Image (tube, grey):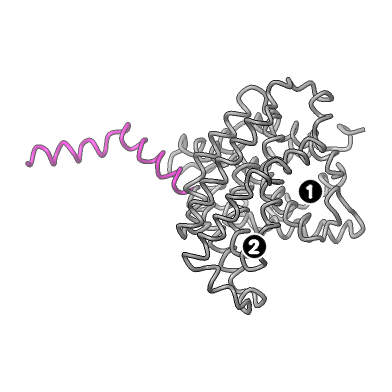
Amino acid sequence: MTHQLASAVSASHSPEISARQSSKSNVHSLAALWARKYYVSVTGMEEQPSIEKDENLKEVTSKEGRERTSDKLRQNLTLASAQAWSLTETLLSEEIRRHGIDPNLINPLQIAADTRHLFQKALAAYSEHTTPRRLSVVVSKDFGQVRQKYTSVDRRAIGFVSMQFHYTGQMLLKWLSPAEQALWIPYLKVMDDHMYMPLQAAYEAAANHSFDSPALSAVQHLLPVSSKIAVSVCQQICRQHPKYASYSGPLNSITVKTASIRDVEMFQVYLCLCVLEDDIHSVQRELFPLCVMLYPRLRVSWRLVQDMIKTLGWDMHDRLSPDDMAAFIPYLRTLTEMFSSDVFK
């Protein structure tokens, strides 16, 4: 017994075992930080007076109510998916030719099937009373696999999947009551974020860092405040461009505001990935080409993007320590240069 205990202690201190434990802890740490955001957002939503006063809220939040909502969405999922592809095709079909994307990579039936599979998993979790916070951890790997599937050959293909997924979610909301929407939207945001953002790649990159890594520490300090930064940045951009309207409407409309906040969070996640990988390639190969493909179609001007990046940099500067900020500055500078007016003359 003493020999076994000594062996176990020795093994726990071996570099290989410690590295594996450190890797797992880093992954769980970032996943937990991201999941925490949904706990905060859901708590905030529950405190809204309009939802508290809804006489149907108790019924909708019950086990039976959640199952009815899930069944309703499952029954309409195929139709919503078909309607979503029609919107996606209208928006992006010309981009396949313009960007020289291999049409064989854009398989509508496969994209719709993968989208439905992810929604089915989320609906099962919803009916089982899984919280949005927990859902963020549960579905992370599945979304990571779908992203990997569509980015492995041509990273721009994920643009079609992201839009299909987003529009499917928007179509499904039509079949829900206001109380059901209030309960379902946080789950929809979890899924939307995982589809648009390279979260799984960030978790995997974190696994290569030690506990005392300055890069990992900077990312761990940014993620908990990333939503606040995104909201602040979008508010400032709305004030700077009060009359601006995108493809989906004015900047201050709920739909556009929600998408804008998600995009600012997305830029932050790509910055985190750059810091963790010590490389700008995720922005060069994925984020920038996607923006070039999607933003003109969504009527998002490059001036708007430039102002967003500038405001993002200042907001991060106000909230992070100098040491943490130092990890992000090289990539913020490169991001600013890539989206500068000189590039889009």
Relative to 11, is 158 on the left or the right?
right
- Tell which residue pokes out farthest to the left in this image: 1
The residue shown at (68%, 56%) is: 173
* Image coords of residue 68 (percent x, y): 54, 60
Find residue 92 and report its horizontal and vertical position in percent: 80, 34
Q: Which secondary structure lies at badge 1?
A: helix
- Residue 301 locus on image (x, y percent): 87, 44
The stretch in magenta equals 1-30
Is 336 above or below relative to 106? below
* Residue designated by label 2: 181
**Viewer-closest of 299 and 263:** 299
How far across and how far down the image is residue 262, in percent?
69, 51
Crowdedness of circle 1 by 10 Å Cα count: few (<14), some, many (20+)? some
Nearest the camera: 133 or 303? 133
Query: Which amino acid, by three-letter code, is at mark 2?
Result: Gln
* Residue in view at x 66 percent, y 46 percent: 268
- Per the image, the residue denoted by label 1 is 310
Quarter holding residue 60: bottom right
Residue 18 covered by magenta stretch: yes
